[in-house]
Image: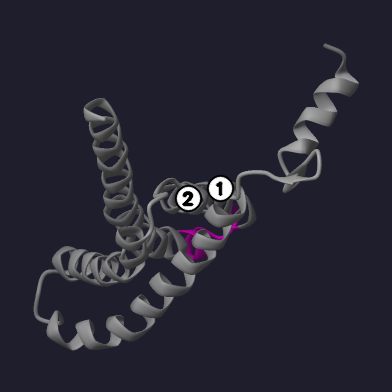
Amino acid sequence: MSSKEQKVEFQEFFRFTKDGKMKSGTFAYSITYAALILIVYGTAYYFLIDVLAPLTKDLAPWLANLIGAIVPALVGALICLIPIVLISNKKPFFLGYVWIAVFALVFLIAMIILLKDDREALSIFLHLFVIMVPAPLLIGGGSALYLWKRSERIERTSEDYD
């Protein structure tokens, strides 16, 4: 296969039609869901951090940070996972979390490079990153993966009985 043919195949991934017919919308749906995830989790953190701060002020800092990371992540996951129960194709929802993980990794690398000379700013960024990124990815992404695989297993089982 020539490099020109490989280039055409790569470009075809980003097109939504092939031979005049609509291709799978998984790519578009997953990107859209990733944007929705960012909005929902950002909103959850924005509103819940101020509510949780006075409630956790007397706790050990590590425990207050843990609560401040997990509670908004749980609320965001519950909101984000409502559509996954209602729609049959659950794959794009999980892939939305994969996109968020990719965006987060790129953002982390870029910020480390940009803040390499300012240790204090890098420390603050890494602290916020660790509080705000892993919990939503693990809770929401893990739940979405579980629901997607469970749905596939149920579909395969029902096909076996047909």
User: Going by the picture, which residue comes out furthest to the front?
Assistant: 162
User: CB of mark 2 within 8 Å of CB of mark 1?
Assistant: yes
Label 1's element?
helix
> 78 left or right of 32?
left
Q: Amino acid at mark 2?
A: Pro
**What residue range appears in magenta?**
115-122
Q: Which mark is residue 92?
A: 2
Label 2's element?
helix
Give the position of the C terminus as an image quadrant: top left
Q: Amino acid at mark 1?
A: Thr
Image mark count? 2
Q: Which mark is residue 26?
A: 1
Q: Earlier in the sequence, mark 2 or mark 1?
A: 1
Q: Nearer the viewer, residue 132 or 9?
A: 9
For the point 83% across and 28% down, which residue is it?
7
Q: Quadrant of residue 44?
A: bottom left
Queried whether the magenta region covers residue 120, the answer comes back as yes
Q: Position of residue 115 (x, y in %)?
A: 59, 57
